[in-house]
Image (spheres, helix red, strand yellow):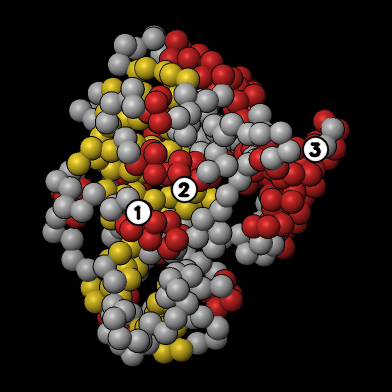
């Protein structure tokens, strides 16, 4: 959601590019607050399952607004390195750096995740972070691989990519057409498209659910400290653009990068992933120490579409917060809690929910979960 480090050629459709840096500069100028830093910091730590970043180095690949780099520094990171190809993003991050007293342990650079020579100048980091960036490079999988090259043996790799599994109605191809149209439009038409999106995707949907859409917009900052209107512009304009299936990303990380999935959070536009090298002796060992996964016994009961059910009556007292429930498939977290029942039935892909003391779920590949070779387990305390 920040930079576009692709060098394009004349006639290349990817030559159409959104001005990410200008959008983030405007966001910081109009919306920066201590509250947003705090929210961003809390989101970062919650997903990493840490209380602080003391003693850890943090590398922000595609720093954009600089807000998340600042959040990492405020969380106690021993060293923060931020880089982005976009000059406006670099300047905006430098402003937050200056606002923070120009700390010597926070370095800001201009460079591309697709530039091997630039990456070779960077040190390995304990936490390599890239939120909503790599899918905007025009070479997503190469960008993911290059960013993973900044890991050492005990690092964690925290990335977020637009989910192909989430954008199904309308599909990803529809949104690519919208993005091209937005980037070709004049300023007045762009403003009209922003308002049309807000009406169709937020206001009408909220009203159908008998919810207050304006409360949602005003409270949007609770999601990583971001701004609704700037995120809408980023979404409509963000181009070039790739989408990645959740399990497609997990498989790529394992097969191409030799990385194991530690944590995943799906159900929004970007799916968040946390990876590490097999056998890494990092802080995650402590996070999982003493964890007990409860095995789910087959057979599972078939429902409509891709949905299956298993009774959890024996665990009813532990099912209070559905967002703390983590389903595991073959030992790996699935991370798509509290999905609507209709979405589980219609699209599946690992969506699940707790309903009437039972688990309604789908296999990540939409196959029969009763088949040989598939195992399922859960924990109820995964905050």
Most foreground residue, 302 or 7: 7
Q: Which mark identifies residue 141?
A: 2
On the question of residue 149 being in view, the answer is yes
What residue is drawn where x is 50% and y is 60%? 245
62 versus 158 height, above or below: above
**Residue, x 47% and y 65% (percent of image)?**
338
Sequence-first disc among 1 and 2: 2
Q: Is residue 48 above or below residue 67?
A: below
Q: Position of residue 6 (x, y in %)?
A: 57, 34
**Residue that label 3 marks:** 184
Q: Is residue 122 left or right of residue 142?
A: left
Separation (CA) of disc 1 from disc 2: 10 Å
Q: Position of residue 239 (x, y in %)?
A: 65, 40
Badge 2 density bin: few <14, some 14–19, many ≥20, Cα 10 Å: some
Q: Residue at x 64, y 57 (%)?
A: 172
Label placed on residue 256: 1
Residue 262 percent across, percent down from the top left: 29, 54
């Amino acid at each position: 959601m920040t930079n576009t480090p692709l060098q394009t050629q004349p006639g290349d459709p990817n030559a159409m590019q959104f001005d990410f840096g200008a959008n983030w500069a405007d966001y910081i100028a109009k919306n920066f607050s201590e509250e947003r830093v705090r929210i961003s910091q809390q989101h970062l730590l919650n997903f990493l399952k840490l209380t602080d970043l003391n003693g850890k180095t943090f590398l922000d690949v595609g720093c954009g607004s600089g807000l998340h780099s600042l959040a990492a520094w405020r969380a106690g990171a021993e060293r923060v390195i931020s880089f982005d190809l976009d000059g406006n993003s670099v300047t905006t991050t430098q402003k937050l750096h200056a606002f923070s007293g120009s700390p010597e342990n926070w370095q800001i650079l201009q460079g591309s995740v697709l530039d091997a020579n630039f990456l070779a100048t960077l040190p390995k980091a304990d936490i390599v972070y890239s939120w909503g960036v790599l899918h905007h490079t025009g070479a997503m999988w190469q960008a993911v691989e290059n960013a993973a090259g900044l890991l050492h043996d005990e690092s964690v790799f925290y990335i977020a990519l637009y989910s192909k599994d989430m954008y199904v109605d309308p599909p990803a191809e529809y949104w690519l057409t919208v993005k091209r149209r937005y980037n070709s439009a004049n300023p007045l038409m762009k403003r009209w498209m922003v308002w049309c999106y807000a009406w169709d995707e937020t206001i009408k949907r909220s009203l159908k659910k008998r919810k207050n859409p304006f409360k949602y917009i005003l409270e949007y900052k609770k999601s990583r400290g971001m701004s609704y209107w700037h995120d809408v512009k980023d979404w409509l304009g963000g181009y070039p653009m790739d989408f990645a299936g959740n399990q497609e990303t997990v498989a790529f990380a394992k097969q191409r990068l030799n990385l194991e999935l530690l944590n995943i959070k799906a159900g929004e536009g970007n799916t968040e992933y946390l990876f590490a090298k097999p056998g890494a002796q990092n802080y995650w060992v402590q996070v999982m120490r003493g964890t007990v996964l409860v095995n789910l016994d087959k057979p599972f009961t078939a429902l409509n579409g891709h949905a299956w059910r298993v009774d959890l009556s024996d665990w009813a007292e532990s099912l209070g917060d559905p967002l703390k429930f983590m389903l595991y498939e073959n030992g790996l977290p699935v991370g798509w809690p509290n999905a609507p029942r209709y979405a589980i039935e219609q699209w599946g892909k690992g969506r699940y929910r707790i309903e009437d003391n039972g688990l309604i779920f789908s296999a990540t590949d939409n196959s029969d979960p009763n088949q040989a070779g598939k195992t399922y387990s859960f924990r109820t305390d995964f905050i």
